[in-house]
Image (tube, rainbow, N blue to C red):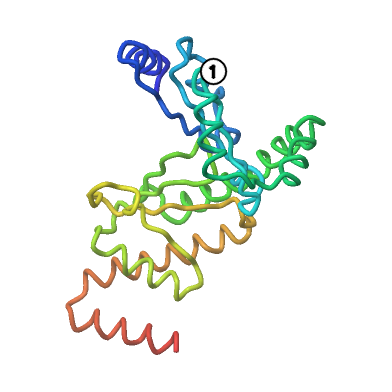
Amino acid sequence: MPLERRLALLAWAGRTSSWVIEDDYVSEFRYEGHPLEALQSLDRDGRVIYVGTFSKTLFPALRIGYLVLPRSLVPSFVAAKWATDRFSATLAQEALTDFITTGQFERYLRRAGNRNAAKRRALIGALRQHFGDRVEIAGENTGVHLVVWLNDVRPRELDAVIARAREAGVGLYSVAPFHTSPPPRAGLLFGYASLTEADIRAAIRRVADVVQRVVSDRARPPSDAHRSRTRDSDRSS
């Protein structure tokens, strides 16, 4: 949200004695523009509960998250933690503490950010090369995912795109599970942090071919589309 909206939200929380839970998801990876200031850093009334995790910035198996709490909430959260989970992995927390306090974590974030930025450029470049204005890209300035809207694919055709891409060796994920109601457009969530730039380019080339075949099937008479799917099935088997 723009700064004015952020300040308005904090003012509302102060007036109504409400809490704002801020999940600052992978904010460490921002590739263009100035970093967005967290709500928690703007909070003067102690109304923001700041939530973070190291599972995305380091590796998922670490399973360590954290809260930055208003002072008034610390005793309640400590009591709740004690009642529900007394056995967090001490060794992993001690190692992570050393990693942070020695400055290694900050250096790692810089290196990881540069790697992710290069992969992001490769993904956006491949999408532009193979799709042009037939896609709309969102969320490209931060994080480790892109949302890509397929302008020439109908929502009901998205399952076919995902299935054919899987047959071609590419895993695709619809944005639909992240919506409270079915989105009116066909959208995909692309993750790129664990892939190489070469893998990204090869995958998008295959996806472009899959999308072209799905769109072409729509334009054919039903019998021709059926024969095309049969040929695809024969080739894959």
The three-letter amino acid code for the residue at tag 1 is Arg
- The residue singled out by tag 1 in the image is 71
Can residue 212 be seen by looking at this rendering?
A: yes
Residue positioned 40% across, 68% down in the render? 210
Q: Nearer the viewer, residue 92 or 185?
A: 92
Question: For the C terminus, which image quadrant?
Answer: bottom left
Residue positioned 56% across, 45% down in the render? 85
Q: Is residue 221 left or right of residue 166?
A: left
- Say if 91 sits above or below 47 in the image: below
- Say if 236 sits above or below 19 in the image: below
Q: Quadrant of residue 26?
A: top right
**Helix, strand or loop at disc 1?**
helix
Question: For the N terminus, which image quadrant?
Answer: top left
x and y, in percent, of residue 164 in the image: 39, 72
Q: Nearer the viewer, residue 82 or 40?
A: 82
Can residue 36 be seen by looking at this rendering?
A: no
Taking the view exactly as shown, the residue that stands out farthest to the right is: 102
